[in-house]
């Protein structure tokens, strides 16, 4: 279930779901203290609340992300300059981003001699897989500079965090070698709609054409269709399309966002509780009833968890969102309420099947 390669938990659950908290929501923090999730990601850095989380859940893996607009790794300036100049600028921006995070008041405090936060992300969903290779390589240098600065200060950086459904493993190996060699933790965003296994099932049912056969994933694919794993479970596809073959078991995966959004099918970026279907006309799901029934979404989450539990290198998956704040549309993603009630009833402590001291 958990390989505990870099971070050791003392308590284990029958699920890997964590929280993604967007703002200082009392109900979200109350749920944290009731369920004591293994992972909490937050965009709110209220010092006293973060201290309390660290004190009351000492083994929690606490992740921060500083929201910036615009997000800049140097690409906002002239991209036609020589690569040497672009790389120099990206490294400078990466260091500046790390320094900005380190200046946050919460990072001046400690609990039992340790930093409050375990890890920090840098930029979020910065570009799609279609961006040119040089830009990807420039961002690799940004992540390298950011990561080294954070590690030197005692924090782990979480790399990548691209939008759902982006990139193949060979792209990562080719264009992000510095990140893959430096980072321990790789972040993924995974969504689908109106079920979390929709595109995965479609992929498994595809005919055995040369293209689909070529898209099958070694070691972890089911050997059906193109093996799926295009939206939810994309982490598995990327890792086994070259990353694990080259870097072995170096990396731990964290799903830093997961859930449902109509955006995966060309609709608006709105979640399961949205009351309007915004998919383009003509798509099979364009007439799908909304909002998604709670039990249907819960069934999707149970499927997703059953897959995550198979992979000991996956630390957990942050439910987006658990404590909505900011944009009104985030309310359509809210997991507090019926989903959290079901998770609380479902949750139970279990023994970890993987013991790093006595591996199988």
Image (tube, helix red, strand yellow):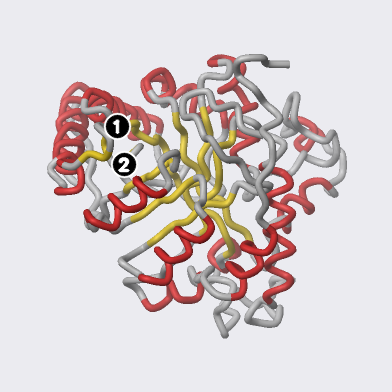
- Is 148 positioned to the left or the right of 161 in the image? left
- Give the x, y percent position of residue 84: 19, 21
Which residue corresponds to the image point at 55% horizontal and 43% vertical from the top-left? Answer: 316
Count the numbered circles shown. Answer: 2
Instruction: Work out which residue is located at the far bottom of the displayed protein and give it.
Output: 275
- Give the x, y percent position of residue 181: 41, 18
Between residue 265 and residue 59, name the one nearer to us.
Answer: 59
Mark 2–mark 1 Cα distance, whole angstroms, equals 7 Å
The N terminus sits in image quarter: top right
- Give the x, y percent position of residue 317: 55, 48
Pointer 2 or 1: first along the chain: 2
Between residue 303 and residue 288, name the one nearer to us.
Answer: 303
**Residue that mark 1 sits on:** 155
- Give the x, y percent position of residue 330: 43, 71
The C terminus sits in image quarter: top right
Q: Where 247 sits versus 162, above or below?
A: above
**Disc 1 element:** loop
**Do the residues under discs 2 and 1 have CB atoms within 8 angstroms?**
yes
Which residue corresponds to the image point at 44% horizontal and 23% vertical from the top-left? Answer: 180
Q: Residues within 10 Å of mark 1 (few under 14, many from 20)?
A: many
Which residue corresponds to the image point at 64% horizontal and 49% vertical from the top-left? Answer: 232
**Residue that mark 2 sits on:** 117
Q: Where 206 sits versus 137, above or below?
A: below
**Disc 2 element:** loop
Q: Where 173 sits versus 208, above or below?
A: above
């Amino acid at each position: 279930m958990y390989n505990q390669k870099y971070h050791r938990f003392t308590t284990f659950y029958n699920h890997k779901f964590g929280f993604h908290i967007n703002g200082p929501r009392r109900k979200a923090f109350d749920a944290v203290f009731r369920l004591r999730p293994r992972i909490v990601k937050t965009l709110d850095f209220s010092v006293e609340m973060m201290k309390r989380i660290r004190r009351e859940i000492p083994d929690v893996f606490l992740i921060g992300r500083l929201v910036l607009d615009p997000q800049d790794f140097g690409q906002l300036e002239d991209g036609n300059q020589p690569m040497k100049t672009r790389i120099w600028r990206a490294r400078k921006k990466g260091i500046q981003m790390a320094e900005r995070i380190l200046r946050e008041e919460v990072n001046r405090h400690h609990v039992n001699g340790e930093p409050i936060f375990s890890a920090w992300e840098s930029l979020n969903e910065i570009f799609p897989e279609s961006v040119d290779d040089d830009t990807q390589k420039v961002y690799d240098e940004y992540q390298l500079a950011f990561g080294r600065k954070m590690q030197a200060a005692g924090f782990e950086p979480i790399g990548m965090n691209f939008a759902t459904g982006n990139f193949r493993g060979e792209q990562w190996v080719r264009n992000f070698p510095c990140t893959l060699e430096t980072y321990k933790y790789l972040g993924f965003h995974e969504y689908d709609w109106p079920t979390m296994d929709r595109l995965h099932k479609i992929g498994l049912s595809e005919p055995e054409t040369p293209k689909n056969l070529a898209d099958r994933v070694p070691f972890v694919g089911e050997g059906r269709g193109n093996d799926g794993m295009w939206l939810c479970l994309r982490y598995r596809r990327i890792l086994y399309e070259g990353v694990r073959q080259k870097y072995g078991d170096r990396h731990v995966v964290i799903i830093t966002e997961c859930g449902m959004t109509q955006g995966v099918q060309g609709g608006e970026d709105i979640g399961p509780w949205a009351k309007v279907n915004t998919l383009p006309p003509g798509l099979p799901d364009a007439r799908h009833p909304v909002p998604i029934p709670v039990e249907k979404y819960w069934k999707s989450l149970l499927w997703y968890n059953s897959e995550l539990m198979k992979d000991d290198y996956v630390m957990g998956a942050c439910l987006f969102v658990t404590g909505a704040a900011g944009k009104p549309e985030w309310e359509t993603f809210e997991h507090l309420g019926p989903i959290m009630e079901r998770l609380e009833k479902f949750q139970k402590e279990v023994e970890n099947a993987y013991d790093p001291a006595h591996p199988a």
